[in-house]
Amino acid sequence: TESNPAMALVGDEADSQHLLNEGRASLDGSDVENETKSSGDVLLTFKINNGFLYRCITTSAFGSLLLGFDLGIISGALIPLEDDLNLTRVQVEFVTSSIIFASIIGSLVAGVVADTLGRKIGLMMAAAIFFAGSLGMALSPNFDVLITWRVVTGIAVGMGLVICPIFCAELAPRRERGRLTSFNEMFINVGIPIAYLVGLTLRGIPNDWRWMLAAGAFPAMFLFVMTCLMPESPNYLLKQGKTAEARAIVERLVDESEDPQVKEAVVRQTLSEMKRDMNSNENMATWTEMFMAKENRAPLFIGLGFSILTQLPGIDSIIFYSVYTLSTYGVDEDLALKVTLAMGLLKLGFTILTAIFVDSGNVGRRLPVIVGGFVGVIAMGIMAVSAMYPHSATTEVLLIFGMLLFVSAFGLGYGPMCWLILAEIFQGPYRSKGMSLGSVVNRLGSFTIASTYLTLVSVLGFGGTFTLYMLIGIVSVSFAYAFVPDLTGKTMGV
């Protein structure tokens, strides 16, 4: 079994501390890092069972890949779909944004499903619904039927967006939590270039847009099958009183080669920390408590504010409408498709880069957010200036450069950090509903951008629209600088 050193919390309970002291003696000189905390916690080095951990995290992250795939595939399918069904500009906006609006419903449902049926069942439901929605969209004979299936698919997307980061945050060891929870955004960005490649491959064949939309059934089917083989979240099992099952899963997270006494200390304290995370209360917070509890006011304000402000600077206007924007401005459509693919790959690359360094004390959560937000403002400014002038070789290069820089900045900061911060900022009883609410406002921001972009362009032009997004981006990065905390290596909840 492949293993990797990581850190786990070992607290000051008498029995765990006794095992910890014995475990230290058996480490044969291996380094043990101590960290002073208010609770007297001690950090103990142990070996992670990477094979088991990454299988679980990767499988759950496919719930986010579904959104990425739809984001990418609709960009390539939009123009032939518009021609085939004779859609108006407003109908095109609605086809694009309806799945986002429906994902809000899925996000609200997801918190309830995750708390009552479990994280595993929730992901399986999302996969099954997305599978049906993909086939339904592909077979749609007209606009009304297409919208119906877009709504169905959106519900699945919303469920996956909420349940995936919850599962990742609850299963991952504390010092690996940031990197592994960012798999959520990473797999959204894996789905986007995959969809772009599928679109490029299928473009031009008879009924190309139908085959593009039907292709979404394949990742959904994979998610369903792999989730069947995945264990449940140990946090959820503890809430259901299934301590033995939760313990068995935590034990599997520690590599078999680890010292038995160290392993026992890690397992005991991990379970103890999970119970503390629930505040010794097996019942989740009610919606009234979610909004009224004094201890949840700051997390709610920061979580919801940051969630919507990651979307309003206009990322989905670039992702959804990149081909439309470039070709309308005067860029050759083949080049526009290649630029779109490059955008997807850059967004993925910078998300992976952030995932590598997010758990480093020198990087953490705040730095990528602030840097990414600031660079995004600059990029949108470049796009605004270039689009204010008639098309030329120079303005074309500047517009394309601005788009590539903007999606790279989003992949560096707002993209992966939004879901990680949401997963970490809420205390145990509030986490599922907090993630649901965060996803709802995030999707509302996305829906606002996707459903108004073409209208804004018709009124303000590309230059005016991008200027508006730049101003919103300044507000967004200012909010992040003032309020977003850094919970790197700390217990979840503020």
Image: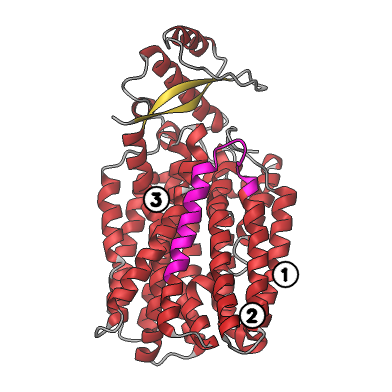
Name the residue beneath numbered marker 1. 471
Type of residue at label 3?
Answer: Ala
Chief SS of the magenta region = helix
Q: Nearer the viewer, residue 117 or 149?
A: 149
Which quarter shows the N terminus?
Answer: top left
Name the residue beneath numbered marker 2. 386
Left or right of residue 94, residue 257 in this image: left
- Residue 320 within the segment the image draws in magenta: no
Which of disc 1 and disc 3 is earlier in sequence? 3
| Residue 476 image point, x, y percent | 69, 60
Name the residue beneath numbered marker 3. 61
Whether residue 109 is visible here, answered yes or no, is no
What's the residue at 60%, 76% (across, down)?
Answer: 398
Counting other residues with Cα less than 10 Å from the Cα at mark 1, is it few (<14), some (14-19), or many (20 or more)? some
| Residue 302 image point, x, y percent | 67, 50
Marks 1 and 2 sit apart, C-alpha to C-alpha, by 16 Å
Instruction: Please state the extent of the stretch shown in magenta in the rendering.
Output: 341-367
Which quarter shows the C terminus?
Answer: top right
Q: Secondary structure at mark 1?
A: helix
Type of residue at label 2?
Answer: Ser
